[in-house]
Amino acid sequence: MRKQKITRTAEQQLLLDQLKTVAAGLGQTLAPFCEVVVHDLLDPSHAIAALHNNLSSRDVGDPATELGLARIADAAYPAIVANYANSFADGRQAKSTSIGIRDSSGQYIAALCINVDLTMFHGLQSMFAQFSRVDAGAGAPQESLDPVGADGIRRRIDEYAARLSSTPRALKADERRALIVELREAGCLDVRRAMEIIAQHLGISRATVYSYAK
């Protein structure tokens, strides 16, 4: 059957062309685990207008999905549907995001869809979990490679910075002085190598820490 010619305004054609350019850039950036698709919602029978990193075994010219048809039917349909669970035809799990594009009249004319293949990420997650597993059983040796008290000092510094909605290395000079007072009152300055530990965690010199402690 001969494809019916679709009439578009100059604005609608420009939006579709620009969206194809965006999709091409995203496809190159997110390859090979992310499929990027442009749907022409003015031609639902042949909606796929561009397809990069083909993971779904579809082709340009294939029809619109259920979500695309829902947008065509309802101008109030959400413009962004992000991170929803999906799956490819062969059963692979995917995470998808669909972004609808309207023209100046408010009509949905296209959509940009991103489908991430989660298969390898799930495999990597399992590998990292296995690699980071430690034996914490009763018979496991108890050992620390860090000087006694160092973790406590770092934790107090982190907590102090968090109270100020900051990070240890972003603290201002007056905030660092107040921090040293708190650490002294908590007995942290008596810990071996305390000044060095504090300096490293704050990203300043030991001399500066000593000056604050005076």
Image: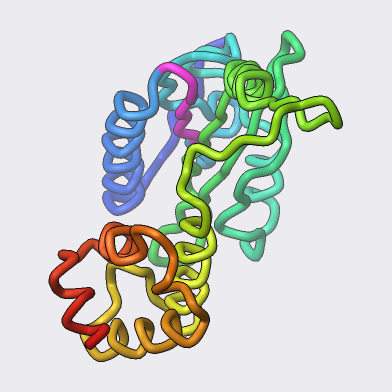
Q: Quadrant of residue 57?
A: top right
Q: Is residue 35 magenta?
A: yes
Relative depth, front residue between 115 and 7: 115
Q: Residue furthest right?
A: 138
Magenta stretch: give its range: 32-39
Left or right: residue 114 versus residue 123 is left
Q: Quadrant of residue 45?
A: top right
- Quadrant of residue 79 within the rendered picture: bottom right
The quarter of the rendered structure image containing the N terminus is top right
Q: What residue is shown at x 63% (from left), y 40% (from top)?
A: 68
Task: Residue at 33% x, 50% y: name it.
Answer: 9
x and y percent of residue 191 in the render? 44, 65
Residue 98 place in picture, x, y as percent? 56, 44
Estimate the x, y position of residue 102 in percent, counting from the top left.
Answer: 46, 57
Name the main secondary structure of what is drawn in magenta. Answer: strand
Find out whether residue 214 is within the magenta segment: no
Q: Residue at x 70, y 27 (%)?
A: 134
Q: In the figure, 194 relative to 60: above or below? A: below
Q: Is residue 142 above or below residue 99?
A: above
- State the quadrant of the C terminus: bottom left
Horizontal side of 130 relative to 32 (left or right) equals: right
Residue 106, placed above or below residue 62? below
The foreground one among 166 and 174 is: 174
Q: Nearer the viewer, residue 142 or 58?
A: 142
